[in-house]
Amino acid sequence: MIDLRSDTVTTPSEEMRAAMADADVGDDVYGEDPTLNELEARAAERLGMEAALFVPSGTMGNQIAARVHTDRGQEAVVDVQSHVYKWELAGFAQHAELQVRTFDAHRGVPAPEQVEAALLEEDLHRPGTGLLCLENTHNSRGGLAIPPSELGDAAAVARNAGVPVHLDGARLFNAAVALDEPASAFAAHVDSVMFCLSKGLGAPVGSMLVGSEDFISEARRVRKLFGGGMRQAGVLGAAGLYALENVDRLATDHEHAQLLAAGLDDVSGVTVEQPETNIVVADVTGTGMTEDEFADACSDAGVQCSGFGDGRVRLCTHLDVTREDVDDAVDVVADVVD
């Protein structure tokens, strides 16, 4: 089976498993796990920020950030296609008691005038804006890699108004590699960043939340509140440290995505958007099948992909996908369509 549903399906290599088995550990709630401490220091350094916190999932990282940055009842301004809005169970409302105001912008990043129009000042009748949340790469818009300058233009308006900015950077390193920019170039424009270790970087569990020392100090308390305080978690931290060494190889995933997109686009009835990173989005309405029928037929034939809405499917390349897998996947889809 060739699994292209997501880059979350990777399994740890033998070398990563060995690093986990050999990890030096301690009680992280007491701040005594040396491996996690090293991972957090390295993540902060990589993003050019003061401090970092290991969290079990990217969703928890985003939710902690919202809780720390805001006061109850404020508004969070987010893209209508953003992960925090579509796929996190209304967590902003449940965990931080926020209202959400959406924008629908080209490539998912609002122009400065859109940000300005969305911001509300607190008064007798309105709670005011508490957070602007951006996303990079942008999952639901096809893995788009947003340049630091575009993020910066949007973020500057909010920050100048005293509104903090959080970056959902679940696949931030995909954007960094695709645009040949250091991850710190993106982080420089925002107040906090979450990035996942368990997607293209290949760790089995975990994400990092990065920001100022004060922000991370409060985030640590909220992590405990959310049930994310862990004990000898260095076994996971070791996988995270190993995963950070996989950043450069993300370019291979992007090359595989380009090849996959080109091959699928030659299949009758399939139209493919040009991928910018490791996410390939294919419109299959021309095959006469719904997206679910198409995904089910492909799965039965040995290739797994995910329904993506509006007659489209998503296929993700990752470190467990080889060039041969890409070629085989194209052949399988062609046979399914025929």
Image: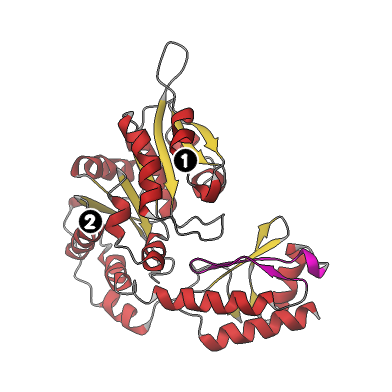
Q: Check disc 2: other Cα within 10 Å, few if <14, some if 14-19, many if 20+.
A: many
Give how far across and how far down residue 70 sits, in percent. 36, 31
| Alpha carbon distance from label 1 to label 2 | 28 Å
Q: Which amino acid does label 1 sit on?
A: Ala
The N terminus - image quarter: bottom right
Q: Is mark 1 on a helix, strand or loop?
A: loop
Q: Residue furthest top?
A: 124
Say above or below: 53 vs 39.
above
In the image, is 258 to the left or to the right of 236? Answer: right
Say above or below: 249 vs 286.
below
* Residue 61 can be seen, yes or no: no
Q: Quadrant of residue 37?
A: bottom left
Give how far across and how far down residue 113 sits, in percent. 46, 34
Q: Which residue is drawn at 27% across and 77% down?
A: 19
313 vs 205, nearest the viewer: 313
19 vs 192, nearest the viewer: 192
Q: What residue type is labelled 2?
A: Ala
Callout in the foreground (1, 2): 1
Tell me, for residue 44, which label it has, or none: 2
Q: Residue at x 25, y 41 (%)?
A: 215
Q: Which residue is drawn at 53% across and 40% down?
A: 90
The C terminus - image quarter: bottom right
* Residue 9 can be seen, yes or no: yes
In magenta, the rendered stretch is: 269-287
Q: Residue furthest right?
A: 288
Residue to which mark 1 is pinned: 111
